[in-house]
Structure formats: C-alpha cells, structure tokens
Image (tube, grey):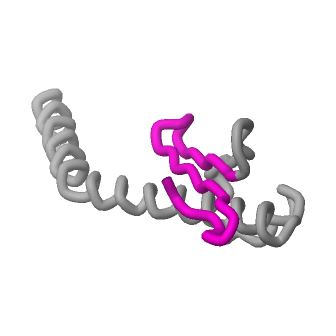
Amino acid sequence: MRRVVLLAAVLLLIVIAVAGITYGPRAYGAMQVGVGYVAHQMCACQQIAGRDESGCRADLLPAMSRITSQALADRPGTKASLLGGLIQRTAVYETGAGCTLQ
C-alpha cells in the first residue's frame, strides 16, 4: 500500500512538472498582457479622461481585480503589478502621444 501511495505521488509530481513546463511560458505571457492592459487603461482614464482611480478601476474587467495599480510619483502615468511586483508594467502619459507602455 505504501508503494502505491509513493508511486502515485511521484506520478503526480511528474504531471505537475510537465504541465508547468508546457503551460508556464504561456501563462506568464498572458499575465504580462493583463498587467500591461491595466497600466494603460488606468493611465488613459486618469491622465486623459481626468477621472479618479476608483472610477477607473470600476471600468476594468472583473478578471483584472488582482492586478494592483498606482500613480507614478515622478511623472504622469501608472504602474501596475501582479504577484507582489513579480510582473510589472508602466504606462507613461506624454502630451500629444497619450499613454504608452514602457
């Protein structure tokens, strides 16, 4: 019985590792897109439309609720992050060009 449990645990770890190797890069890319979307939308909403953060946040898709955003201190724009800052994107407002991702 103990061998069966050990074998099942090893097989489960192998399946998890293969899934991580297969889908990890795709998931990371999707997270980069989501964080960039939030950074750009929040920047445009605040800098171009002149709305406050809570009003802009309400316009985002519900799936984006885990992505945090904050205004930049040194220039007009927004920084968004996910997973405690592991994935970050910054959108900066420039007159005539609007908000662009950095």
Picture coordinates of residue 25, whole percent (x, y): 27, 54
Picture coordinates of residue 92, whole percent (x, y): 62, 54
Q: Is residue 50 above or below residue 21?
A: below
Picture coordinates of residue 31, whole percent (x, y): 45, 56
Image point (47%, 44%), residue name: 87
Q: Is residue 97 left or right of residue 16?
A: right
Image point (11%, 30%), residue name: 3
Image point (36%, 53%), residue name: 28
Query: Going by the picture, which residue comes out furthest to the top?
Result: 2
In the figure, residue 52 lies in which quadrant? Answer: bottom right
Q: Is residue 41 left or right of residue 53?
A: left
Q: Is residue 27 magenta?
A: no
Picture coordinates of residue 51, whole percent (x, y): 88, 65
Closer to the camera in the image, 32 or 5: 32
Q: Is residue 85 left or right of residue 3?
A: right
Closer to the camera in the image, 50 or 34: 50
Q: Is residue 35 above or below residue 75?
A: below
Q: Is residue 62 above or below residue 20?
A: below
Q: Is residue 71 left or right of residue 80?
A: right
What span is in magenta?
Answer: 77-102
Please count the marks in the image.
Answer: 0
Query: Going by the picture, which residue comes out furthest to the front?
Result: 96
In the figure, residue 82 lies in which quadrant? Answer: top right
